[in-house]
C-alpha cells in the first residue's frame, strides 16, 4: 500500500479508522442516491486502505444496494447448493433472516466468502435493517494482511509458493465447487501480501505431506483469530458492512436466538486470487 496515500486528507467523505488493522466508519455520505465522482473515488480509496467499510443510518432500497455494489463490479451469485441465505424479491439481492425458527445461522465460523469458487467474490455488502433488541449478532473481522505480517520470516518462506484446496461441499453440499488457490497471495490493488486460507473452506495443502499440511493449517487457523488482528462490529438498525473478501475474514456471532436479525446482501464478482510473486 502507498503509505503517502493514507496521509492525504479526504475532501468529501469522513473516514474514521476503527482499529489498527481493520475497518473504517464512513460518514458524510448518502447511499440512497448516486455518488458523484469525488465521493466514489474516495470510497474506493477507503475500501482499499481499510478492508472493511461501515455505514450507519442508511435506509437503502434494493436499487440502492445493487447500485453500491455495481460501483465495484458486476454482482455475483452464491455458488453453494445449500445455504442459509434465500432469494429476495429482487434477484440481485439475497435475504439473510434468522429468528426462533432458524436451526443455524450463516457464517459462524471464520471464513472468506466462498473461497471454494474458482473466482471468489471480490467483496460482500451486508445491510441489516432489524437487529436483536438487546444486542448480539455482531460480526467480527480479521485482517489477513496483519496475519501475514506477523508470521516469522521462516514461516513466510515455507508458505511462499504453496497452494491449498478450498472445498465448498462440506459447507454447501454436493455440486458446490472446489478450487485450488495460493496460500500467500498479493492483493491486486494494495499490492500487499496476505494469508489466504480459512477454516471454513480450506481442507488441505498441496506440495507437502498430508499430516504436515494439516498441522500447519491448524496453526494458521488459530493464528488468524488473534484479537490483535481483529475488529468487532456492533450492528445498529440500518447499518451496512462492506468487506473486501480478498484480504479480510469474518465471523458472524451466534448469540441472539430466539431474536430476529434480518437484512440483505449482495456480493461482487471477483477474479482468481493472484499468487504473490
Image (tube, rainbow, N blue to C red):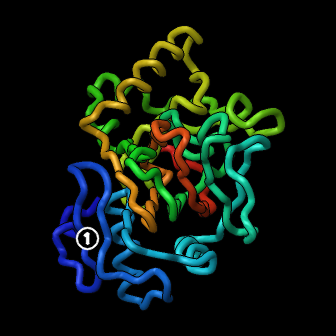
- Residue 118, position as x, y percentages in the image: 68, 46
**Residue with the most extreme bottom position:** 36
Query: In this picture, is 225 found above or below 12?
Result: above
Q: Residue at x 33, y 36 (%)?
A: 147
Q: Residue at x 53, y 39 (%)?
A: 257
**Residue with the most extreme top position:** 211
Query: In this picture, is 256 found above or below 239?
Result: above
Query: In this picture, is 270 found above or below 55?
Result: above
Residue 271 visible in image: yes
Circle 1 is placed at which residue position?
Answer: 15
Choose top left, top right, bottom left or bottom right for residue 270: bottom right
Horizontally, residue 97 falls left or right of residue 233, namely: right
**Mark 1 packing: few (<14 Cα in 10 Å), some, or many (20+)?**
many
Image quadrant containing the C terminus: top left
Horizontally, residue 185 falls left or right of residue 231, namely: right
Number of numbered callouts drawn: 1
- Residue 194, position as x, y percentages in the image: 39, 43
- Residue 51, position as x, y percentages in the image: 37, 57
Q: Residue at x 73, y 71 (%)?
A: 90
- Which sits in the foreground, 132 or 142? 132
Q: Residue at x 46, y 56 (%)?
A: 244
Horizontally, residue 102 falls left or right of residue 113, namely: right
Amino acid at each position: 500500500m502507498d503509505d503517502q496515500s493514507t496521509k492525504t486528507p479526504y475532501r468529501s467523505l469522513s473516514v474514521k479508522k476503527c482499529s489498527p488493522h481493520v475497518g473504517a466508519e464512513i460518514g458524510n455520505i448518502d447511499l440512497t442516491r448516486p455518488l458523484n465522482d469525488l465521493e466514489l473515488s474516495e470510497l474506493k480509496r477507503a475500501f482499499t486502505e481499510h478492508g472493511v467499510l461501515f455505514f450507519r443510518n442508511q435506509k437503502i432500497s434494493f436499487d440502492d444496494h445493487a447500485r453500491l455494489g455495481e460501483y465495484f463490479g458486476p454482482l455475483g451469485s452464491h455458488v453453494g447448493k445449500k445455504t442459509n441465505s434465500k432469494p429476495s424479491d429482487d434477484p440481485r439481492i439475497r435475504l439473510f433472516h434468522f429468528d426462533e425458527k432458524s436451526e443455524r445461522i450463516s457464517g459462524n465460523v471464520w471464513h472468506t466468502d466462498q473461497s471454494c469458487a474458482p473466482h471468489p467474490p471480490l467483496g460482500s455488502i451486508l445491510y441489516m435493517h432489524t437487529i436483536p433488541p438487546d444486542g448480539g449478532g455482531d460480526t467480527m473481522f480479521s485482517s489477513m494482511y496483519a496475519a501475514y505480517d506477523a508470521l516469522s520470516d521462516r514461516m513466510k518462506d515455507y508458505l511462499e509458493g504453496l497452494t491449498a484446496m478450498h472445498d465448498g461441499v462440506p459447507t454447501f453440499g454436493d455440486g458446490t465447487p472446489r478450487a485450488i488457490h495460493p496460500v500467500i497471495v498479493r492483493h491486486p490493488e494494495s499490492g500487499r501480501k496476505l494469508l489466504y486460507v480459512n477454516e471454513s473452506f480450506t481442507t488441505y495443502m498441496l506440495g507437502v505431506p498430508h499430516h504436515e499440511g494439516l498441522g500447519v493449517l491448524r496453526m494458521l487457523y488459530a493464528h488468524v483469530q488473534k484479537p490483535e488482528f481483529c475488529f468487532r462490529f456492533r450492528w445498529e438498525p440500518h447499518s451496512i458492512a462492506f468487506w473486501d473478501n480478498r484480504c479480510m475474514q469474518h465471523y458472524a456471532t451466534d448469540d441472539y436466538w430466539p431474536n430476529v436479525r434480518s437484512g440483505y446482501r449482495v456480493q461482487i464478482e471477483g477474479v482468481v486470487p493472484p499468487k504473490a510473486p
